[in-house]
Structures are given as C-alpha cells and as structure tokens.
Image (cartoon, rainbow, N blue to C red):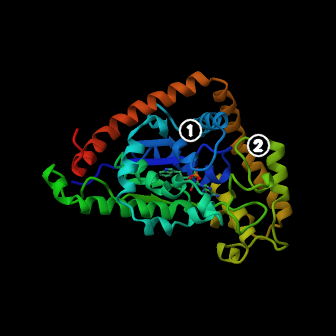
C-alpha cells in the first residue's frame, strides 16, 4: 500500500521573513494546497537551538503565522500550527536521536555553518536539529516537502532515518500489519522554480538570510515600498546589459539572482524574463523589478498588519491547527512506540 500524498513544511520563527523565505518556500506552500492536504508549521522548537529572547520568540511565531495567512495559506483547508504544541514532534525526535548516527549528523553543512568555529559551545539541540526535522515530517507520514535548496541535505537525512527505522523494525512492523513500505515514507523534497536559492543583494555568493548583519542584503516581507525600491536600487550588479537567454547569466551571480527574483515574483521563468528584458541595462531593469516586488509584497504587507492586529484570531488558528495536527500524528507515534517496544 502506497502512502497517501501529504505535504509538510516548516519555517523558523526567528526574526522577520525575507524574500528568500517567501519565494523559496511560502509562495510554493500556497500553490501546493491545490495538490494535496497540507500542514504548515511554525517550528519554534527548532528556533531555540540558538538563543531566542522569549518575548521575541512569541512575537515571531505570530509574525510567521500572519505571513502564512497573508500569502494565501487557507487555515480552513491547510493545517497551520506551531510545533511546540504538538508533543509528537519532540517524542518522535527522541526515537530518531537513537536511530540517526553521529557520523550522519556530523556531515550536515548547516550545523558546521551555524556552529562556526566554536563547536564546543553549540547547543546539543543544534546538532540534533535534523532529527527533529525528520520527526516533523514523518509524524505525519508526509510524502512531499516544499523547501528552498538549503534544506536539501536535511531532507536526505530524513529519508535515511525513515529507511533505517523501517529496516531495523521490519519484523515488528510486519507483525502490526505494515507492508514492505514500512511505517515511514521516503519523502520527496520539492525544490522547484526560479528562486530556490535567493542570494544576498549585497553579495551574489551569499544566501539571503535572516542572520546577515546587513539589512540591505535582504528584502523583508515587512519592508515598505520605499525601502524595497532603495534596496533594489543599491543591489550589487555588474556593468553589462542583461543577456537574452539564461546561458548568458553564467558567471554573473548578481544578475542571475535578480533575474531569478523577477521570474519568481512574476510567476514565470528566467527565459521569459530575458526574452522581455534581454539587452536592458540594470538602470532600467532595477526600477521594473522594484515595481514588481512592491506590487506583490505591498498587499501582503497590508494583510499582515491587519492580521497582526488581531492576536485572538492568530491564536485561534494555531490552537485549532495543533488539534488537527495531533489527530494525524497520534496514531503514527503510537505505532512507532509499539514497534520500538515501549510498554503503554
Ligand atoms: P528556515 O526557517 O531557515 O527557512 C524557511 C524556508 O525558507 C527557505 N529559504 C530560502 N529559499 C530560497 N532562498 C533563500 N535565501 C532562502 N532562505 C530560506 C528554506 O529553504 C525553508 O524552506 N529547517 C527549516 C525549517 C524546518 C522544516 C521542517 C522544513 C523545520 N522542520 C520540516 C521542512 C520540513 C529551516 O530552518 O527553514
């Protein structure tokens, strides 16, 4: 029996969301609602793997929830919730801590980047982070996970964990009536579109990131029209005109990035953007890009302001989402515990 299609993805409530999060992930979430049942999670357990001011964490959780809804995620259709409210994530993550191997986690590039040189001082949670991510996905037997490119390695690890669990407990699973495919699916990452890795506006070799000290490096979803126009105007570029096809973007990371952003915002491809703008200088392309960004982000921004003014509604969405999520995760966790041999 194959797994029923189900989509899961998560966003950390750390700082405000930026254009990379929107184009690489949230905008894709909105589209996936038409394809399968979806769960979208504000991953507050993940956030505390590095220090978060408690008030700020709660604020950021509301902020990400509001961004989900403002972008077009429909909480009546999709399940929107925060991770810490559904205990199954932490419980399954513990089991996965005992399935995943030290060597697997030691190879995770995100841990190496985030821990930096001072590894001794990184939290244990930061090291075990991908196991919790696997638990997020597998507690719902999710088959598809839309993410930006930076999450690819973590999703490969989730597949390794699923496979090892299914293999190690194959006999017990068979006794419970599970077939060849076991309890956990080998989840497919969905990394698609022209903006799976949006780069910094100041440096085409660096990812656009919440943690970049330069605010000019990213467009925040909360930036107003003036801020957006100014950041696009100041974005680093080269002196050449735009090429007329994507091959001409090779070796031009900043140009490639701006064309990718344009394509994603317009819901089209780099090819189409270059058919239209090939030969243009950045002095002409940048104002067009700024106008497009404002036309997409401004209505979302207005919706976010309205949503954030009604905390009661956001809390109700999260509470109801958590209840619905727990109903799906409950039976999966129960079977995972049974096969491990926990006495209930
Ligand atoms: P996070 O919170 O860092 O980012 C949220 C989503 O945004 C994508 N993203 C980008 N996409 C394109 N260009 C960028 N510059 C860029 N920066 C971020 C990320 O790929 C991600 O899809 N570990 C995850 C959260 C998580 C999760 C999960 C995701 C926890 N559990 C289960 C999927 C499934 C993270 O830190 O994302």
Q: Which residue is under mark 1?
A: 72
Q: Position of residue 124 (x, y in %)?
A: 52, 54
Label 2, secondary structure: give it: loop
Q: Can residue 252 be seen at all in this image of the molecule? A: yes
Residue drawn at (35%, 51%), measured in percent from left and top?
Answer: 95
In this view, the residue in front, 293 or 304, is: 304
Contact (Cβ within 8 Å) of mark 2 with mark 1: no
Tell us which disc is closer to us: 2 or 1. 2
Is residue 269 shown to the viewer in this render? no
Quarter-wise, where is residue 304 in the image?
A: top right
300 over 120 or under it: above or below: above
Q: Is mark 2 within 8 Å of ligand 1?
A: no
Alpha carbons under labels 2 and 1: distance apart:
19 Å
Query: Which quadrant is home to the N terminus?
Result: bottom left
Foreground of the two, 182 or 223: 182
Q: Is residue 309 left or right of residue 240?
A: left
- Where residue 176 sits: x, y (%)? 16, 49
Q: Position of residue 55 (x, y in %)?
A: 66, 33
Q: Which residue is label 2 attached to?
A: 223
Residue 263 position within the rendered picture, expressed as x and y whole percent measured from the top left: 65, 58
Q: Is residue 334 above or below residue 137?
A: above
Closest to the observer, 334 or 126? 126
Q: Is residue 279 above or below residue 311?
A: below
């Amino acid at each position: 029996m194959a797994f029923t299609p189900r989509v899961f993805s998560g966003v950390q409530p750390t700082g405000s969301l930026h254009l990379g999060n929107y184009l690489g992930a949230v905008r894709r979430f909105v589209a996936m609602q038409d394809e399968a049942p979806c769960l979208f999670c504000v991953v507050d357990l993940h956030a505390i793997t590095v220090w978060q001011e408690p008030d700020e964490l709660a604020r950021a959780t509301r902020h990400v929830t509001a961004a989900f809804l403002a972008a077009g995620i429909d909480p009546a259709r999709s399940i929107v919730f925060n991770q810490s409210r559904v205990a199954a994530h932490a419980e399954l993550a513990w089991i996965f801590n005992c399935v995943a191997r030290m060597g697997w986690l030691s190879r995770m590039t995100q841990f190496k980047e985030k821990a930096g040189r001072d590894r001794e001082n990184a939290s244990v949670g930061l090291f075990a982070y991908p196991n919790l991510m696997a638990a997020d996905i597998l507690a719902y037997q999710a088959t598809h996970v839309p993410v930006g490119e930076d999450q690819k390695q973590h999703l490969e690890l989730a597949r390794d964990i699923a496979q090892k669990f299914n293999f190690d407990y194959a006999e017990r699973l068979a006794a419970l009536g599970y077939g060849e495919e076991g309890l956990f699916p080998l989840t497919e990452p969905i990394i698609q579109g022209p903006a799976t890795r949006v780069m910094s506006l100041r440096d085409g070799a660096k990812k656009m990131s919440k943690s970049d000290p330069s605010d000019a490096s990213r467009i925040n979803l909360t930036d107003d029209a003036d801020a957006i126009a100014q950041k696009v105007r100041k974005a680093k570029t080269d002196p050449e005109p735009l090429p007329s096809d994507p091959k001409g973007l090779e070796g031009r990371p900043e140009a490639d990035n701006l064309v990718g952003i344009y394509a994603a915002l317009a819901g089209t491809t780099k090819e189409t953007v270059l058919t239209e703008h090939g030969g243009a200088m950045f002095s002409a392309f940048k104002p067009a890009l700024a106008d497009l960004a404002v036309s997409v982000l401004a209505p979302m921004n207005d919706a976010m302001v309205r949503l954030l003014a009604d905390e009661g509604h956001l809390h109700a969405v999260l509470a109801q989402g958590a209840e619905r999520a727990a109903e799906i995760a409950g039976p999966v966790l129960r079977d995972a515990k049974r096969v491990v041999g926990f006495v209930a």
